[in-house]
Image (tube, helix red, strand yellow):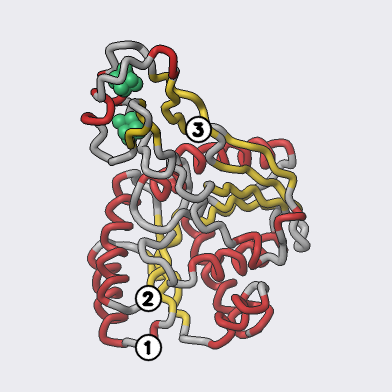
Amino acid sequence: MSGKGGTGKTSIASSLAILLSKKHKIMCADCDVDTPNLGLLLGLNEKNYSWKRLYTSEKPALISNKCIGCRACLNTCVFNAISWKNEKPVFNKLLCEGCGACEIVCPADAIKFKKVNNAMLGIASSHYGFKIVTGQLKMGESGSGKIVSLVKQEAERIAKNDSCEFILVDSAAGTGCPAIASIQGSSYVIAVTEPSPSALSDLNRTLAIVRHFRIPYGVIINKYDLNKKYTLKIKHTIQKQNAQLLGLIPYDDAFIKSLLNLEPVIVHNKELEALFSDIIKCMYHVL
Ligand code: SF4
Ligand code: SF4
């Protein structure tokens, strides 16, 4: 999990998955449904997945012959998702938040909500011998929290069938609904951060959520040597909260090579393998 984007969360997740899979039967769930990249870093492309459509969002549709042109819906929508054309409302699906206000105020029962295909769910087998479930929210669509829950449900179903010992979840970034849905029910959270003021601020928000759910957690500080002053501040934060410092990862070009070549970072720097193995050992002590 990472409050801030760009901390190396997915690069670290892909390497941890490969190392864990050497000793355990595992599977992965990519819950970063706005920008799912875990599969990419494991060398998968869209064609490697079997896909199914998800419908977790509803949007309004006009029943034209019932509409009396009163403009109540137009005047009610605070998201500017309704325009006016030929004396009838027109709904803009990209701006609509699906709040339902227009349906409530319509005196003619001329607005009905319809389920929309707002995301895709994909299942693939990685080249490393474990499966991955991923969610992909369609651009401009809402409902990412529900998509994350469905991705996790599917991962749990497969994990049960395949007798997996671990499901490794690449959480949605940020601290909103998809991030919360990503960690719910987890037995351990690894928070990935970097030494910068914004990352520290986001880490505090992230850890507040993790503590709320009373999930044991540890923190990895990536690129720790780029700003030792903030690394120290983050260490103090971790100490104050009696949390576990799982590892300090130095800035390393291997992360950039990994992203460019779509390969896990341990492929580009074998020394990192030892560091990630230590991180897994720290996690074992708690699980
Ligand atoms: S559902 Fe809400 S956001 Fe969408 S058009 Fe109606 S009032 Fe606007
Ligand atoms: S509130 Fe209903 S009747 Fe009035 S303009 Fe909108 S859709 Fe038509």
Looking at the rendered image, the quarter that the N terminus falls into is bottom left
Q: Is residue 76 left or right of residue 122?
A: left
The CA distance from mark 2 to mark 1 is 9 Å
Classify mark 3: residues with Cα within 10 Å, few (<14), some (14-19) or many (20+): some
Q: Is residue 221 left or right of residue 75?
A: right
Question: Which residue sits at x=50%, y=33%?
Answer: 56
Classify mark 2: residues with Cα within 10 Å, few (<14), some (14-19) or many (20+): many
The CA distance from mark 3 to mark 1 is 42 Å
Q: Which residue is mark 1?
A: 226
Question: Which residue sits at x=22%, y=29%?
Answer: 76
Image: 130 above or below 92? below
SS state under label 1: helix
Question: Which residue sits at x=61%, y=39%?
Answer: 156
Residue 194 is tagged as 2
Q: Which residue is mark 3?
A: 56
First-in-chain label (2 vs 3) = 3
SS state under label 2: loop
Q: Residue furthest front?
A: 86
Amino acid type at circle 2 is Glu
Q: Report if the CB atoms under discs 2 and 1 are less than 8 Å apart.
A: yes
Question: Which residue sits at x=45%, y=25%?
Answer: 61
Asked if residue 103 can be seen in this view, the reply is no
Q: Is 166 in front, or is 10?
A: 10
Q: Is 96 in front, or is 242?
A: 96
- The picture places residue 133, in percent across and down from the top left corner, at 64, 48
